[in-house]
Image: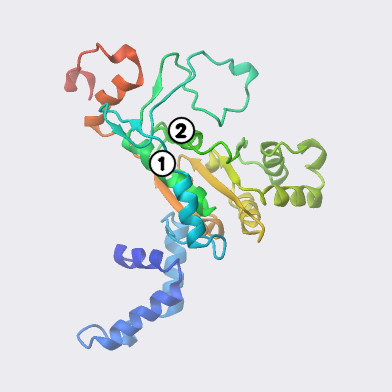
């Protein structure tokens, strides 16, 4: 399927029947185009779309979950999430703000769960630099939280996805609680359920093997406004991802989901029911070459007096 048709399908919320109907109407209205009989059948188009998505092609949908948030409520929530000014990598004021990392070295042995109320860089004196990439992630998460939707933040390993997401969550108003679920590699459903219970401060040990009680507790937890962050979501298999979809689909759900990880978009493509409910797809690219020196100097004072290295000798 061409990129133009794929984009139009995205605008239609993934409705293949609506896209097929448009193509037939266009063919009937314009005699110079192929006749309507030459337009692929609806079944053929649905099969092509299914094959494309199974191959990993992402269908970004710009629609929030139906009936969850009225436009006026969304606009008011987005206005309340306005962030303070910040300094970008060039040292100029722009939104959002550069935040200083915790200056003391953390005790990794005593803190198993990364903090969600700040960005820990593990480098004394380092700063989170408000690069263009960080700003885009911040805007995407603010949009998602205002709409009470689901966001997918993806990109190659080492591009700063986790730091950008934590920075965005740190800038949310204090009244919005943030929960982070720590998931193992390929967790079974009981393990995923236990991770979610732990994220909400619920008794995971007592509820893990009591399926009905655990499900009711999680559904109740999802009725409160807030954000649930799942980093390294690529570790979760498709059947377990569908459990997240069931929780998000509950009529009483008010919780926003932020799914982050390297290859997260390919992982969600294998769970099309959940992928179709993602409101915001945010790619985090690597820094452009002109950004690197400015970002390094803003990142840590060590680089303030460093001379620019020769591109061939320093490999850029």
- Residue 116 coordinates in the image, percent (x, y): 56, 32
Label annotation for residue 77: none
- Looking at the image, residue 206 sits to the left or right of residue 198; the answer is right
- The disc label shown at residue 137, or none: 1
In the rendered image, residue 187, in percent from the top left (x then y), is placed at 65, 41
Q: Which quarter shows the N terminus?
A: bottom left
Q: Residue at x 54, y 42 (%)?
A: 233
Q: How many labels does the image show?
A: 2
Q: Which residue is identified by label 2?
A: 167
The answer to whether 81 is drawn above or below residue 270 in the figure is above
- The residues bearing labels 1 and 2 have C-alpha atoms spaced at a distance of 9 Å
For the C terminus, give its image quadrant: top left
Q: Which of marks 1 and 2 is nearer the N terminus?
A: 1
Is residue 40 shown to the viewer in this render? no
Nearer to the camera, 77 or 204? 77
Image coloring type: rainbow
**Residue located 75% across and 38% down the image:** 202
Q: Is residue 221 visible?
A: yes
Q: What element carries label 1?
A: helix
Residue at (27%, 14%) from the top-left corner?
304
Residue 9 in the figure: left or right of residue 35: right
Question: Could you say where residue 73 lies in the image, as x and y percent from the top left?
Answer: 51, 57
What percent of the width, then of the height, locates residue 22?
36, 79
The quarter holding residue 123 reads: top left
174 sits to left or right of 128? right
Q: Is mark 2 on a helix, strand or loop?
A: helix
Find residue 206 and report its image quarter.
top right
229 relative to 163, above or below? below
Viewer-closest of 312 and 5: 5
* Mark 2 crowd level (few <14, some 14–19, many ≥20, 10 Å Cα): many
Instruction: Verify CB contact (< 8 Å) between mark 1 and mark 2.
Output: yes
């Amino acid at each position: 399927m061409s990129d133009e048709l794929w984009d139009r399908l995205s605008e239609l919320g993934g409705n293949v029947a609506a896209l097929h109907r448009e193509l037939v109407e266009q063919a009937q209205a314009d005699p110079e185009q192929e006749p309507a009989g030459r337009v692929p059948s609806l079944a053929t188009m649905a099969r092509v779309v299914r094959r494309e998505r199974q191959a990993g092609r992402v269908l970004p949908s710009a629609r929030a979950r139906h009936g969850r948030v009225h436009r006026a409520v969304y606009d008011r929530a987005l206005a309340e999430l306005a962030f303070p000014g910040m300094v970008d990598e060039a040292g100029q004021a722009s939104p959002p703000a550069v935040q200083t990392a915790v200056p003391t070295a953390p005790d990794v042995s005593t803190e198993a769960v990364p903090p969600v109320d700040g960005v820990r860089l593990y480098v004394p004196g380092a700063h989170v630099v408000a690069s263009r990439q960080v700003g885009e992630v911040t805007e995407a998460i603010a949009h998602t939280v205002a709409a009470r939707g689901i966001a997918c933040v993806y990109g190659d390993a080492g591009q700063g996805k986790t730091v950008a997401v934590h920075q965005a969550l740190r800038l949310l108003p204090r009244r919005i609680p943030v929960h982070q679920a720590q998931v193992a590699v390929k967790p079974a459903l009981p393990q995923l359920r236990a991770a979610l219970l732990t994220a909400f401060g619920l008794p995971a040990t007592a509820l893990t093997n009591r399926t009905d009680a655990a499900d009711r507790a999680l559904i109740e937890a999802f009725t409160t406004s807030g954000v649930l962050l799942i980093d390294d979501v690529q570790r979760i298999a498709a059947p377990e991802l569908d459990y997240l979809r069931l929780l998000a689909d509950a009529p009483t759900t008010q919780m926003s989901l932020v799914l982050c990880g390297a290859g997260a978009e390919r992982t969600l493509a294998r769970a099309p029911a959940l992928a179709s409910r993602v409101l915001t797809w945010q790619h985090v690219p690597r820094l452009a070459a002109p950004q690197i020196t400015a970002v390094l100097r803003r990142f840590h004072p060590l680089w303030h007096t460093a001379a620019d290295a020769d591109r061939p000798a320093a490999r850029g």
